[in-house]
Image: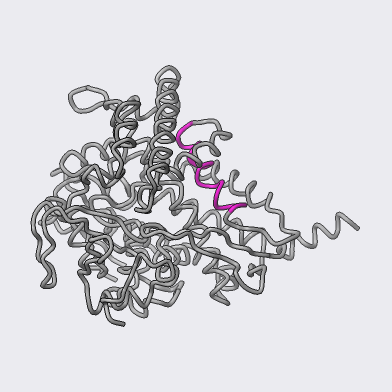
Amino acid sequence: MDPAIVNLSDVAVQKCPWQAYQTLRDEAPVYRMPDTGMYVISRYEDICQIVRDPARFSMQADRSFLFKTEAATRYYVDHGYPRHTPLSTDPPYHTEFRGHLEPFFSAGRIRQWEPALRELIESLAGNLDTSKPIDFVQAFCFPLPMSVMTILLGLPLEDHKILKQWTDVWVLPFSHAMTAEQEMYVAEEGIKLQKYILAALDEKRRNPKDDLFSLLVQTRREDGSELTVKEMLGFAEQAVVGANETTQNGLAMAMCALIENPGVEAQLRADPGKIRTFIEECLRLHSPTAGMYRWTTQDVEMHGVTIPKGSTVHLRFAAANRDERHFEDPDTLDIERKKSGSHLAFSHAVHHCLGAPLARLELNLSFEILLAQRQNFRFAREQENYDYVPGLALRQLEYLWIESDPVAAGAARRSASTA
Amino acid sequence: MKICIDKSKCQGQKRCFNLYPELFEEGEDGKGLVRIELVSEEDEVDAQSAANACPNAAIVIEY
């Protein structure tokens, strides 16, 4: 394939991008998208180099990156606070900002939530209507991540629905395809989310508990000062947004991979210890965050291409995760793969996903529980069992129709009780 | 799988022992220290994740 005909904005390519990625990695490792002007980076090692170089590849976007219309930009400023997530800042400020909350997200600390998460996921899996085909995305992947976040943030469980709605809207600007009306809608919903968070933080100030929002209001800098309101909001927004669609899509993609790789289900049932590698392989092969952005602070030369100062650089994690320069036989789902955990689905270096231990726990627990309760996972229809939502940055399943059977022990119990 | 920290690259950003305290601890110089060089199979994903999360590529993995 000629790199000149690679079009990542084409929905058909977004659905099945593997050949395009191969062409980019081999023929055009620094590729300028003709329609967006972004520079796409597709090799594993190149992406690692870039994300370790925040001085030249910054996270601080031009404001017009979010909204194209002045009205939406102004609405945000007039009614609330500009977006100020850790993901939009650079070191050294970022190091301190993120560092305050890092211990809360440590692997060990996250494991303390396991009993609560297990109970939640067992109930969600147990409530799946398995007498007929189900849309796994709607029934399981949609409600799970935000329900988990209400537990970690210390919010009422029933608020997961409204939080889900706001966070879905929050990420729409990254589609790079919004009308002026949609921009206003995004701005208005964004401010509603901010008001909700501010009220919740206020409540935690009065009644602190052992949760993330309480920690946010209790955090002190070295000089004893509190985080600013803008910082608390930014961190809270990042937490809900980061936890939402990524985990949702990770769950859906893993179910899809389980079904499309015959034999894997039996292997995981025989050795549940392999679920961990299976999840890593799904994240590697079907990275929910297919790409992220950086902005050049100066002209940068890479592979003979000059990326001018002020350019948007698109780091294509999904392409790097199938780079044969790093992964042997990269298109194969291999639950014995040693290097599986080194994928870039959670990015790398400075902005490596803070919620990675939480996402991994959710994904692993979900498949441990689903495999314990059900078996023979399969597509429910002859065709069109799933489809993708169009978009450049996120790889997202719109629906996924599946069927399964109860596990043998459960079937025996059920038939005994009805006898 | 074996892990070690390249002291010449580590800049003491605390991330390894903040996020994976079962694998790393803080040394007297404020830099990361590996607790157990030989990683158990159960901890291999965490070790790779820690290596990915280090801002300075100071965690080296031997497969």
Looking at the rendering, which quadrant does residue A380 occupy?
bottom right
The colour mode here is one colour
- Locate residue A148 relative to residue A134 in the image: left or right: left
x and y, in percent, of residue A288 in the image? 42, 59
Q: Is residue A167 visible?
A: yes
**In the foreground, A115 or A25:** A25
Q: Residue furthest bottom?
A: A1
Q: Is residue B34 visible?
A: no
Quadrant in the picture for the C terminus of chain A: bottom right
x and y, in percent, of residue B47 in the image? 32, 59
Quadrant in the picture for the N terminus of chain A: bottom left
**In the foreground, A217 or A310:** A310
Position of A170 relative to A22 (above/below): above
Looking at the rendered structure, the number of numbered marks drawn on it comes to 0
Residue drawn at x 34%, y 67% as measured from the top left: A8
x and y, in percent, of residue A376 in the image? 66, 69
Position of A327 relative to B55 (above/below): below
**In the foreground, A74 or A332:** A74
Main secondary structure type of the part rendered in magenta: helix
Magenta stretch: includes residue A141: yes
- Locate residue A161 relative to residue A109 in the image: left or right: right
Residue drawn at x 53%, y 36% as measured from the top left: A162
- Locate residue A119 relative to residue A131 in the image: left or right: left
Looking at the rendering, which quadrant does residue B1 occupy?
bottom left
Identify the magenta region: A138-154
Q: Residue furthest right?
A: A419
x and y, in percent, of residue B50 in the image? 29, 55
Position of A244 relative to A276 (above/below): above
